[in-house]
Image (spheres, helix red, strand yellow):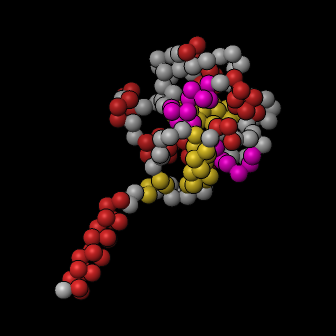
Amino acid sequence: MNKHVVFILIVTFFMFCGCTKKEIYRYEGEPLEIAVAGDKKLPRFQNIVYDYVALADLDQSDTRYDALIITRSAFPEADQDKYVPFFQSVKYPVFFYGADDFKYFAFTVEGMTIDMAKYENSPYVQGFKNLDDGTKIGWGFELPNDEKEKVDDKEMLLRIFNAINSNND
């Protein structure tokens, strides 16, 4: 009788473990370590390490990250003027994930706010990288057919990863 109970417990354990395992998606580019601010948990990919961070803990001179992704829940904090110097000088790319109703310059210009930068047809993901000569390179990734309810996180993230890889110094 005890053998049957142990067997059932073991089978049950493996069934629960199998059901809770999250899928790891394929990404074949260079390995990346990406800081993520906000409460959205991003899908897991091969060669990608996410470090979920608070914006207040970031430092523009930190070189361990290949990029920063800021999700929508962190936009109100990122919209504070105290982060403008960070966004103006950070050396790795910064992406705003879910910024489809305003322009990202709301975060990079002193005195500017999200409300002041409202723009209905903005790309769903907007990003930039500060270059050494004082200019910026920028990205905008639109949703296919402007379908906000059907955001494919995997596709959007692959586009971000490819942009990071193509612009690594």
Residue 132 shown left or right of residue 162 in the figure? right
Picture residue at 52% right of the left edge, 36% below the top:
71
Q: Give the range drawn in magenta.
A: 62-79
**Position of 132 relative to 99 (above/below):** below
* Residue 121 image position (x, y, % from top left): 47, 19
For the residue pair 131 and 72, the one nearer the viewer reads as 72
Number of numbered discs visible in the structure rendering:
0
**Quarter of image, res 116:** top right
Instruction: Evaluate whether residue 129 shows in this view.
Output: yes
**Position of 8 relative to 92 (above/below):** below
Point out the image quarter for the N terminus: bottom left
**Quarter of image, res 23:** bottom left
**Quarter of image, res 36:** top right
76 within the magenta span: yes
**Position of 66 relative to 90 (above/below):** below
For the residue pair 102 and 123, the one nearer the viewer reads as 102
Q: Residue furthest front?
A: 2
40 within the magenta span: no
